[in-house]
Image (cartoon, rainbow, N blue to C red):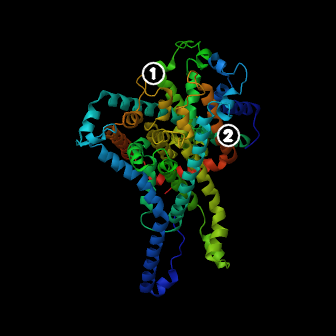
Amino acid sequence: MTTSVTPPVAEERAAPGRARARRSDRARQEARLGWWLAGPAFVVMLAVTLYPILQAMYDSLFRYRLTAPEERQFIGLSNYGVVLVDPIFWRDLWVTVLITIITVVIELVLGFALAMVMHRAIRGLRGALRTAILVPYGIITVVSAFAWFYAFDITSGYVNHWFDWVPGISENLNWFASQGTSLFVIIASEVWKTTPFISLLLLAGLAQVPGDMEEAAKVDGATPWQVLWRVILPNMKAAIMVAVLFRALDAFRIFDNVFIMTNGANGTEVLSLLAYRTSIGRLEIGLGSAVSVLLFLCVILICFAAIKLFKVDLTSARGE
Amino acid sequence: MGRLTGRQKLGWAVIAVLVFVYALFPVLSIFMTSLKSTSDIRSGTFLPPKVSWENYQQILTAEGGARDLFLPALRNSIGISLIATAIAVVLATLAAYGIARLDFRGKKLILTTALGVSIFPVISIVTPLFNLWRNIGLYDTWPGLIIPYLSLTLPISIWTLAAFFRQIPWELEQAAQVDGATPWQAFRKAIVPLAAPGVFTTALIAFFIAWNDFVYGISLTSTSAARPVPAALAFFTGASYFELPVGAISAASIIVTIPVVVLVVLFQRQIVSGLTQGAVKG
């Protein structure tokens, strides 16, 4: 999108030298104004993220417990050594990756189905469907976590009573007593809460699919399935990639659901929770910072992998 | 679109019911739990055996034991989220106006930074802040949450507003000036009415995000001085230490969900366009 400051075309033809000087003056003025306007936001963003992450990197090089501040001591990369050989770190990383992959896959399919429904919906229904789908988006994650937790919980829940005809589910099944069943509920609540976002992104992608191509394919006798795979999905590639990447990064930071439902018990701890437990729970600032920095590096890694592997141009897909 | 056949109508009805159940069932579920009396919490049924408002009394009325846990948290959440939203929207409006209207080097840098900040793991920021805030006295205060909340609200506001502002036909401003308006009048009469809906939508989305925060809330507060609702819910003890606070938490959850549902119902169209335009070119 170009800006609409009109270039002095006529003058330029008449006196190129003077016009160029004036234009560069103008450009400089514009640049200065631009930075005056955008600068504060830029500075605030750096202050609230760049500064803390640099501080975390610095803190991660120390043996530093808040309970014994006078013992603070520079130990180089030892904290990273401690973290990287600890089986708990690897278990938590694995759980995080597992949750990320499963939620993103389910959300992609479910989100696409919901997007299709919204896209095709008859006029009177469209608004109501969108409103309903937006409700989970607006709800506090903690509230959604409690809703799912109470439904499945052995004392307050009704799920066991409803589904006791399903093999494996009985009245005294404690969903939060083992890893698999806990992760099932955690993932279900995460999927419920965040699918709306992915489905809205996919809906925007669907709107970009050229309708005449779809028509042409149908006229040529393509089955709906073929239209989906050959016409619709290829044309939505950018939207799908962006949706997947954003959800993956978001899911990788999962915290609220796990904290509420199991607080990391029974092998459900995720990386964010490990960082929280280490630094804010146990006041091991040095070690906790190392976990935080590693989590940050993982997020960067996912980003780079996505950009390289799938050639997602985030800025172009986001409207620049 | 032609007239629908009976079968199509039936199909859409089934789909609509499925979508509504999917989207609203968990909300209904916690609402039903909130209506159960303490003795019915263990009933194992979806519907409360008999409707009881005791949980709402517990968190809202003076006789209720959990009022001092809930109401301060509600006040904190509303105040902190509103202030963080206001600051973010003002800063983002200026930035997005500059980005959409002016040509200068560094636009891309600002947008990329916003993108980077929005994918930042909150927990990586919270550890150093926890330590710093304790040292400089911002721990467990409103500013101590408002500042980090900007890392949540500002990036999305910049992206959403930049997308909105790019679609404004800025030539209108010049046209108004040609018609004899002063630059300020031209801006106010031609641009502000076009920009206002975008700014409002952005504020709504930013507010939802701040309202949803949990990690900052539990990490950077310790008392009801600044603890927001999501964090307070996690540490709810209820009226008695010997009772499960299930009912009180459910009732509090419903109360903080009502404004969200109202806003979603009123502004569905704007929220959808805001979310998607900020994210994918519309």
Amino acid under label 2? Ala
Task: Please identify the residue farthest to the bottom as the structure is shown.
Answer: A14
Q: Quadrant of residue B181?
A: bottom right
Task: State the SS at label 1.
Answer: helix
Give the label, 1 or 2, closer to the camera.
Answer: 1
Q: Name the residue under label 2.
A: A121
Q: Where is residue A269 in the image (x, y as percent from the top left)?
A: 41, 29
Chain of residue at mark 2: A
Q: Position of residue B233 (x, y in %)?
A: 56, 33
| Relative height, residue A200 to residue B240 (above, below) | below
* Quarter of the figure with the N terminus of chain B: top right
Judge the density around disc 1: few (<14), some (14-19), many (≥20) Cα neighbours within 10 Å.
Answer: some
Mark 1 and mark 2 in contact? Answer it, CB < 8 Å: no
Of residues A71 and B235, the one drawn nearer to the viewer in this rendering = A71
Q: Name the residue under label 1.
A: A180
Q: Relative to A75, is B271 on the left or the right?
A: right
**Residue A212 in view (yes/no):** no
Task: State the SS at label 2.
Answer: loop
**Residue B245 in view (yes/no):** yes
Q: Quadrant of residue A22?
A: bottom left
Q: Residue at x 65, y 18 (%)?
A: B39
Tell me whether marks 1 and 2 sit on the same chain.
yes
Q: Which of marks 1 and 2 is nearer the N terminus?
A: 2
Q: Where is residue A317 in the image (x, y as percent from the top left)?
A: 48, 51
Q: Which residue is drawn at 64% across and 60% down?
A: B196
Of residues B130 and B11, the one drawn nearer to the viewer in this rendering = B130
Q: Position of residue A285 (x, y in %)?
A: 34, 40
Q: Relative to B191, is A240 on the left or the right?
A: left
Amino acid under label 1? Gly
